[in-house]
Image (cartoon, rainbow, N blue to C red):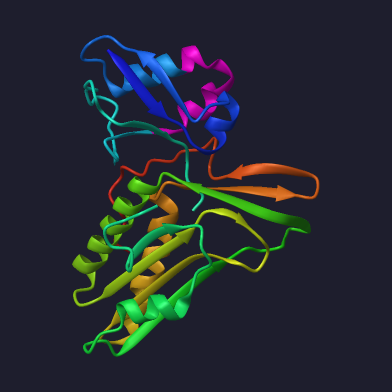
Amino acid sequence: MEIRILLFAAVAETIGQRSITLQLPPNASVRDLVHRLEEEYPKAAEQIRFAVIARNQEYADPDETIHPGDEIALIPPVSGGETDEPSLFAITEEPLSADRLIAQVSNPQAGAVLTFAGTVREFTDGRRTVHLEYEAYAPMAIREMKAIAQEIHQQWPGVRVAMVHRVGKLEPEEISVLIAVASPHRPESFEAGRYAIERLKESVPIWKKEIWEDGTQWQGSQTGTWDPRKPADPS
């Protein structure tokens, strides 16, 4: 069977394509696909080994069977489009507005609204960042944001969450990500807001390329243990 695989970030850059097509035997597993990719693209083998396969926009286990017509994506470790709920969850190339996001989560039951803004830092350990380039697997990113919101609703009933992330080229001091949390009381907003950004950095397929004065690098745990399929730690 013929399977098309979507590629992102450092893996796409190494292979030199945004999608590839492979022939796999019937009933091939996700593990079989990964091994085949490592054989076909040895220069990217290490990056492939530490990536995770998404099947139909959900993180897949190694033993899952791949079927003809499945949407397959190779998801490298994340650094941290359009949607049917653009007011609450979005991937966009447009500048971000905290006021707009606050308006989306505010409600008569909310006694506290917390916002988190992640901005482009110009200097890190004495190294100057010229700009950042973000990209995302937008449909899956939206799904993961919604899943995080569901986790928050289960842990902190009554909390309303909105998340939006920019993609494209961002200059120092520009906002890359905004999260707004509205809750009946202060403690829940702080706890849920921290949980939201930590989970977003763990599992939402968004990648960041840092362009320095003396080089570039895709950010994320490219050679370490990373598994977004593990259950979230409620603490």
Task: Tell which of 17 and 204 is nearer to you.
Answer: 17
Instruction: Indicate yes or no whether the magenta region holds residue 41.
Output: yes
Q: Is residue 52 above or below residue 63?
A: below
For residue 197, which quarter of the picture? bottom left
In the displayed structure, does residue 16 sit left or right of residue 70? right
Q: Quadrant of the C terminus?
A: bottom left
What span is colored magenta in the figure? Answer: 38-52
- The percent coordinates of residue 114 (x first, y second) are 40, 80
Vertical position of residue 184 compared to residue 89: above or below: below
Looking at the picture, how far across and down is residue 10, in whole percent? 56, 35
Report x, y in % for residue 98. 46, 77
The quadrant of the picture occupied by the N terminus is top left
| Residue 199 visible (yes or no) | yes
Please determine whether, in this image, residue 79 is positioned above or below residue 197: above
Q: How many marks?
A: 0
Q: Toward the viewer: 154 or 161?
A: 161
Name which residue lies at 27% across and 20% down: 29
Say which residue appears at 67% left-offset and 61% top-offset: 171
Q: Place residue 84 in its image quadrant.
A: bottom left
Which one is nearer the viewer's eye here, 89 or 118? 89
Q: Nearer the viewer, residue 148 or 84?
A: 84
Confirm whether residue 188 shows in the render.
no
In the rendered image, residue 108, in percent from the top left (x then y), is placed at: 22, 89
Majority secondary structure of magenta residues: helix
- Left or right position of 227 against 185: right
Residue 127 magenta-drawn? no
